[in-house]
Image (cartoon, rainbow, N blue to C red):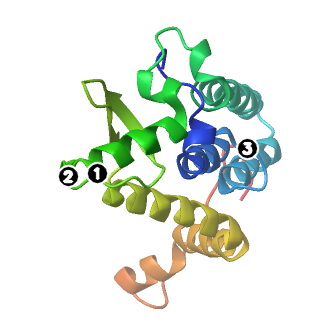
Amino acid sequence: MDRLGGLAKLSPLLALLFFIPGMNLAGIPPFSGFLGKVGLMQAGIELGTPLAYALVIGGVLTSLLTLLAVARVWNRAFWRRPSDAEHPDPVLLAGPDEDAQADGQVQGEGRQDGGARRTGMLLTSRTSATRSATLLPRTMVGSTLGLVALGVSLTVFAGPLFGLSDRAAEDMLDRTPYIQAVMGGDTVVPPVRTAGGGQ
């Protein structure tokens, strides 16, 4: 982390692939992390016990601390200038223009770079007589894009998914079909007693 800086300008795709899951993890609307936390907090408030309220408060504090951590990483790695890093990486200090010129010189000399091509997705670097950059592999970018798309789709289809989970919970709590399948169709199923003494 002390070597990174300016990644938002150098690789906007990498910045986006960090930002969306980071906001999702912190539970910021409209992402699915927010919807899940709201559902849990709503259930805790409806339960109304002191332990449930403590868990709701703990969930809110956890969300705020997660947001603080994600914002700190974003500011250090993506937002600050590369020269402000404690141990700045030489490739990040050079910037994309000088790297492109160095790549052009290497290609003009007929040297091979191991098949790596510049796609604007910088991960790490090493210095030598000729500067070379290790780029994010396409498989890594593809799998990350897939996970980000899955997280966004959970947000888009949150309503039907909540309905499906509610029906599944009701079916799990309804003992009648299971008991009647095992004991016979005319078996009387006693009501379930809750912790508060109700039925």
Which residue sits furthest bottom?
185
Q: Are marks 2 and 1 in contact (CB under 8 Å)?
A: yes
- Which residue position holds label 2? 110
Q: Is 56 positioned to the left or the right of 183 in the image?
A: right
Are the residues tagged 1 and 3 within 8 Å (C-beta)?
A: no
Q: Quadrant of the C terminus?
A: bottom right
Where is residue 51 shown, x and y percent of the image?
70, 29
Q: Count up the numbered dots.
A: 3
Q: Quadrant of residue 178?
A: bottom left
Give the CA separation, mark 2 to mark 1. 5 Å
Label 2 with label 3: CB-CB less than 8 Å: no
From this view, report whether residue 91 is shown above or below residue 87: below
Secondary-structure class at tag 3: loop
Mark closer to the chain start, 2 or 3: 2
Task: Quickly name the residue at label 1.
Answer: 107
Residue displayed at 53% across by 33% down? 95
Residue 196, numbered circle:
3
C-alpha span from label 1 to label 3: 76 Å
Q: What is the x, y in percent for residue 34?
A: 72, 49
Residue 116, x across and y down, in percent? 27, 52
Q: Nearer the viewer, residue 156 or 168?
A: 156
Q: Is residue 129 visible?
A: yes
Q: Amino acid at mark 3?
A: Gly
Q: Nearer the viewer, residue 183 or 9?
A: 9
- Kind of residue at disc 2: Gly
C-alpha separation, residue under disc 2 versus residue under disc 3: 79 Å
Q: Nearer the viewer, mark 2 or mark 3?
A: 2
Residue at x 49%, y 36% (from the top left corner): 98
